[in-house]
Amino acid sequence: MRFNFIFLLAFLLINPLFQGNDNRRYARPPKLKLPVKTKASFDNRSEFYFYRSVLTGQKWGLDKELKRKLAHLNLLHLMTPSGLHLSSLFLIFYFLRRRYPRFSNLVELTLCLGFYFFLPGYYSFRRVALIRSFFILNKVRETNYSKMQIFLFFLTTDFFFGTYRYSPLSFYLSTLFLGLIFSIKEYRIYKMYLLFFVAQLFIAHKFTGVIYPVTIILSPLLTSIFTLIYPILFFNLFFIEYFNYAQWFIRVYTALIEISYDLAQALGFIHVNFLILIGVIIYSQRTRKHALALITIGLVSDLPRDSFTIMLNEIGIRL
């Protein structure tokens, strides 16, 4: 039931039916300029723009065809620093914590609180910083709150006092994935892949209306690879003018994106409509047959994304 509730909220909040002004107070992240020598160290200009994008979020100059392929693979979020990037960088504290637990907790907590309160923009990045600080405090103070209690406390804090007012949609997207992560009692890779794919259905319904089924495997796999190489890319910045190995990793990673996109294209896509989403929302052991029937009808009928709006208009309800 907990997943049904999360997906119901996603359907209500991350929905093209509601087109309010989402970013009234949106504060753009600072325009961080990389040194000229950094750009000069790259053999290929497109690889530099990729590197700049994952570090600063500035997508200007990023290859348009690459952006399109990333969007189809549900990976465009990798081009802007977010909670995923922060978690990737903080892998270093996993190793430090074993030998210097108190020092590593203090440094990580200071960085997380500093990012959350003083970094402009980068809302997803800041949210993960906040929830990490709560987990560190819970461990240090030995309060023994459950991960769901910490998540709810984070949710309340960020909603009323934090980043929600700047970008509600960004808040909804972040909490959708965080809610799924903290709702899982036993971590299984196949379960995570399936839940994240279902979450992508709601996002696809909001933005493009289509999704490639093969991304249930490819997207998490490519995201995991990116998580591993991101710290390597980041730390190369400090000596990149002397030795640029980041471009090699970027070259291999973009080649993987090309191969994955070609595979996704070959296997086809599906239109995401409200019947499929309703089937996902009501799915349980008791309603499995009805849910699968709705999903099947949605797949076979190939209804447009805004079919729900059309249906309501037909009966006189206008949104």
Image: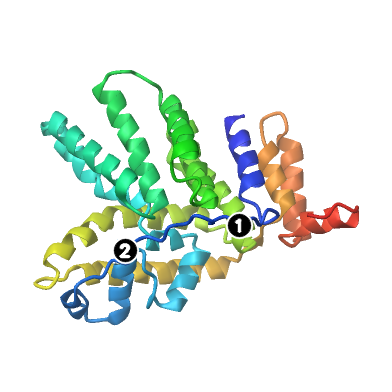
Tag in front: 1 or 2:
1
Q: Is residue 19 left or right of residue 264?
A: right
Q: What residue does disc 2 label? A: 56
Residue type at mark 1: give it.
Asn
Residue 267 falls in image quadrant: bottom right
In the rendering, at what x and y percent does residue 317 appear? Answer: 86, 52
Q: Is residue 253 left or right of residue 1?
A: left
In the rendering, at what x and y percent does residue 97 appear? Answer: 17, 34
Q: Residues within 10 Å of mark 1 (few under 14, many from 20)?
A: few
Residue 98 falls in image quadrant: top left
Q: What residue does disc 1 label? A: 21
Quadrant where the C terminus is found in the figure: bottom right
**In the rendered image of this protein, does residue 201 appear above or below residue 135?**
below
Tell me, yes or no, whether the two marked residues, 1 and 2, touch with CB atoms within 8 Å: no
Helix, strand or loop at label 2? It is helix
Q: Earlier in the sequence, mark 1 or mark 2?
A: 1
Residue 182 seen by the camera:
no
Helix, strand or loop at label 1? It is loop
